Image (cartoon, coloured by chain):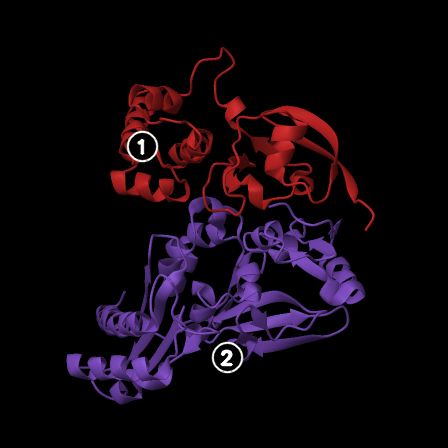
Chain colours: A purple, B red
Amino acid sequence: MKPAPFKYIAATSLEHALSLKAEHGDDAKFLAGGQSLIPTMNFRLARPAVLIDINEIRDLAGIRPSAAATRVGPLTRYRALQRDAAFARLFPLIGEALPHIAHPQIRNHGTIGGNLSHADPASELPAIALALGARFHARTATQQRWIAASDFFVSALTTDLKPDEMLVEIELPSPKPRTGCCFMEIARRRGDFAIVGVAAMMTLGEQDECADVRLSFCGVGETPVDASSAADVVVGSVPSEDAIRDVAAIVQTMIAPNGSVHATADYQRHIAGVLTERALQTAYARGRDGH
Amino acid sequence: MDTDFHDITLSVNGKQYRRRVESRVLLSDFIRHDLVLAGTHVGCEHGVCGACTVLLDGEPVRSCLMLAVQARNHEISTIEGLTNKDGEYHPLQQAMHDHHGLQCGYCTPGILMTMTAFLDENPSPGEDEVREALSGNLCRCTGYQNIVDAVLAAAERMRSG
């Protein structure tokens, strides 16, 4: 229950961190909040030779809103997101999901960039990044690129990031007007990993008809799952209870949960259907009523 | 691999310490073994039980999920610093005693560090908020009810000064 030996380097700037990563590649891990990395090191499931601590690079934390999109630094801690009332109003999906992420002590130190880079398929934020259509800015010492959330999550605990890349910024597009959002999750206890979690966004037209739906899930596969296409059947009309039930049934055929000792795959599929119905109904009502 | 040592300075309960630590030493073990402040308890060592909760710059964190070297130039508060300088209990310590909020006591330091910080931020919590704030601390003895009662009583007492 103690980490294996490693070399610790506190990076003093982003350039310093990236040059260290260029030098050490896969032998090195970035240490952000450490709320997933340190436990895996304590268990010796991870044994990085080098830890590059980025916690003192203050430029990497912060929330920078603009009209079209909000840019969030990867070192921004969950608690900072929770305390920013304007951010929670702009991104109610994230505001609603944050209390489900572990416990207060973890949220005080865990970071959004660490969460997304860790890519735990049961984690809330990757699924929400899919629903929001987030983009991720990745940098090496010499190059940079933007990665769409839909391309970022490759498999369980694996992202598209290369050994010398760091996630340096997260871009969250502002939801369109008249968009209702809802995040729901079932876990064994509050703060546990999700058995199933759903992020739903529904944008309404002038007649309260459904113009666009984003629907994604955590906990039901090797990656977060984008199941927005299941909602094609409600787009263009005011969604009836029956139509929303149809969406839930389609979702159940789209996902392939693994099942675990706590929840069989059938149970997860059942829960995914129930949560789909509830989340879409709630998102619709919130879009219609303007909150 | 050569052993990787770092010289660090940090403040614990307002006192400055200078130590040489190996990079892989967890903050929890550093506090207990190097500083001999054994009030911080170690339970699961993977961030689930909350027994090792300390304050990092005033905010509760798991000391088993931080390296000691990361505490360099930061301020740590542990259970040993909770009483006032005359040795008088913090109102929450007194309330835990009055309401039988502990039995074996193993989880108690972590709970006190978590909930005193919570009461500083939220002086008038409802029972649901107390239970939510307490959710990251496991207690296998009490069933939590007496801890919740103690926190609510301490909040009331602290509000009335």
Residue A132 located left or right of residue B41: left
| Mark 2 surroundings: few (<14), some (14-19) or many (≥20) residues within 10 A | some
- Residue A211 in the image: above or below residue B83: below
Residue B79 located left or right of residue B125: right
Residue under the image location 52 percent in, 42 percent down: B62
Looking at the image, which is closer to me, B148 or B159?
Answer: B148
Q: Chain of mark 2?
A: A
**Circle 2 SS class:** helix
> In the image, residue A198 lies at what x, y percent?
35, 69
Q: Nearer the viewer, mark 1 or mark 2?
A: 1
Q: Residue furthest right?
A: B2
Residue B18 located left or right of residue A103: right
Q: Are marks 1 and 2 in contact (CB under 8 Å)?
A: no
Please name the residue that numbered disc 2 is placed on: A150
**Which disc number belongs to residue B142?**
1
Q: Type of residue at label 1?
A: Thr
